[in-house]
Amino acid sequence: MGLARENVDYLRKKILGKWTWIFLACVISLALLYGVLVEPQQVRFVRISIKNRRLASVLQGIKAVHISDLHLGSAPSLPAQKVMRLLQYIKPDVIFLTGDYVQWHGGRRAYDQALAFLGQLEAPLGVYAVMGDADYTDSRKSCEFCHEISNFSSPVEDRHVTFLRNSWRRVSAGSGSFIVAGIDNEKRDDQSKILPEGLPQDLPLIILSHSSVVYYAVDDTTDALMLSGDTHGGQILLPRLFWQLSGLKPDPLHMYGLFRDGRKTLYVTSGVGTSEVPIRLGVPPEIAVLEFEQ
């Protein structure tokens, strides 16, 4: 009798163990399907409150949008189409772009898709952009972001996007002016001169940089907002310790979100597209709507 009972208990545990593994396999499979087929398409807009008195003095009430990391390929992109619909709904006054418009080594058609997307962008106060590292994977096609294909010495005139390559622009808004500066490449020998020369000191400052690594080179006393992308928020929601130990990202301390150190502020967006693996879990694609407060 005791032996029979032991056999029954053994079979029960074996069956329960088998079903536990089957259940776990189903959960993992469903999560992967969701991460590949659903979440990457769920582009949302998030409202980010920027508390900066100088910027708010000029930009309070202004609709500013931050977009990054489209990673467009050779085929039309559903997330990019959703971004355009969101922009039509939001009607931004100014748009900031922080790079990686094409997939890594995406080919000429990927650049064509990116250029077509950029050609649709327009805002009353302008569209300002920097390049990402993926955008340089075809050096000749990358020139077309800024220059006419027929004459690379002539700037593009049929798009409303101003690319800032270690340069800056003064932008006039309703109640004053502000500066948009673009940092093209964070790998410099002299990190003390990361900002473009000649920046006016008396105007509010917004810095665009594809990688947030540049943030470390900006002095804490600099009253500025930096906008970056590059990380995609990791694409999968994982503890910060994982990114610190893995070394997979150049700036694991600023994977996603709003950060402030001294007088400088950083917002790192999760971006729109994916890179390396086409999956998102817990880090949906977004465009950020910036709201400036005193």
Image (tube, rainbow, N blue to C red):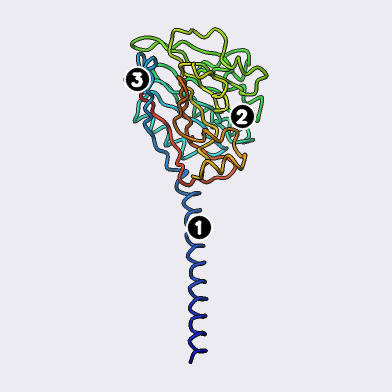
Label 1 – label 2 distance at C-alpha: 33 Å
Query: Secondary structure beneath disc 1?
Result: helix
The residue labelled by disc 3 is: 62
Nearest the viewer among 7 and 77 is 7
Residue 136 seen by the camera: yes
Residue 161 seen by the camera: no
- Describe residue 259's horizontal placement relative to residue 88 as left or right: right
Q: Position of residue 214 (x, y in %)?
A: 57, 24
Looking at the rendering, in which quadrant would you find the C terminus? top left
**Residue type, label 1:** Ile
Q: Residue at x 47, y 21 (%)?
A: 264
Look at discs 1 and 2 and give the one toward the viewer.
Answer: 1
Could you say which quadrant of the image residue 95 lies in? top left
**Residue 133, labelled with which disc?**
2
Label 3 neighbour load within 10 Å: few <14, some 14-19, many 20+:
some
Q: Position of residue 51 (x, y in %)?
A: 37, 23
**Residue 28, labelled with which disc?**
1
Q: Position of residue 178 (x, y in %)?
A: 43, 12
**Residue type, label 3:** Ile
Residue, far left: 61
Could you say which quadrant of the image residue 173 lies in? top left
Label 3 – label 2 distance at C-alpha: 30 Å
Label 1 – label 3 distance at C-alpha: 43 Å
- For marks 1 and 3, the one nearer the N-term is 1
Label 2 neighbour load within 10 Å: few <14, some 14-19, many 20+:
some
Contact, mark 1 vs mark 2 (Cβ under 8 Å): no
- Describe residue 202's horizontal placement relative to residue 182 as left or right: left
- For marks 3 and 2, the one nearer the N-term is 3
**Residue type, label 2:** Asp
Q: Residue at x 55, y 42 (%)?
A: 241
Q: Residue at x 40, y 38 (%)?
A: 44
